[in-house]
Amino acid sequence: MAYTPELNLKGSSTLRRMAWYMEKPMTKTLQAIIEASAKQMEKSKPGAVCLACKDKSKCADCVFNSNKQSTGNIK
């Protein structure tokens, strides 16, 4: 894992409750939230994330790259 963001108390509590609902660990729940958000962002404004991106070195593996076939899973 490259980066571990810290959550404030409200964010952590919210994630915990979502994890209970999903019956998954918080880490897997957070990953599912990120993947669902990425799909929604791409649906609402296709290509917008790519235009805003500041790291063009990961395009081949990026979930927002529509020029490749991908499962959309972030690893």
Image (tube, rainbow, N blue to C red):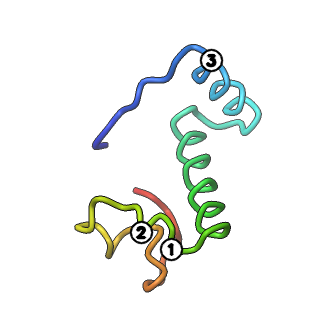
Q: What is the quadrant of residue 50 in the picture?
A: bottom left
Instruction: Name which residue type carries label 2.
Output: Leu
* Pointer 3 or 2: first along the chain: 3
Residues at discs 3 and 2 in contact (Cβ within 8 Å): no
Residue at which label 3 appears: 10
Q: How many residues crowd around disc 2 within 10 Å: few (fewer than 14), some, or many (20 or more)?
A: few
Q: CA distance from mark 1 to mark 2?
A: 6 Å
Label 1 sits on residue: 47
Compute the Cα span from label 3 to label 1: 32 Å
Q: Please say if the residues under marks 1 and 2 sit with CB atoms less than 8 Å apart.
A: yes
The dot on residue 51 is 2
Q: Position of residue 3 (x, y in %)?
A: 31, 38
Q: Nearer the viewer, residue 52 or 39?
A: 52
CA neighbours of label 3 inside 10 A, class few (<14), some (14 to 19), many (20+): few
Outermost residue to the left? 57
60 left or right of 32?
left
Tag in front: 3 or 1: 1
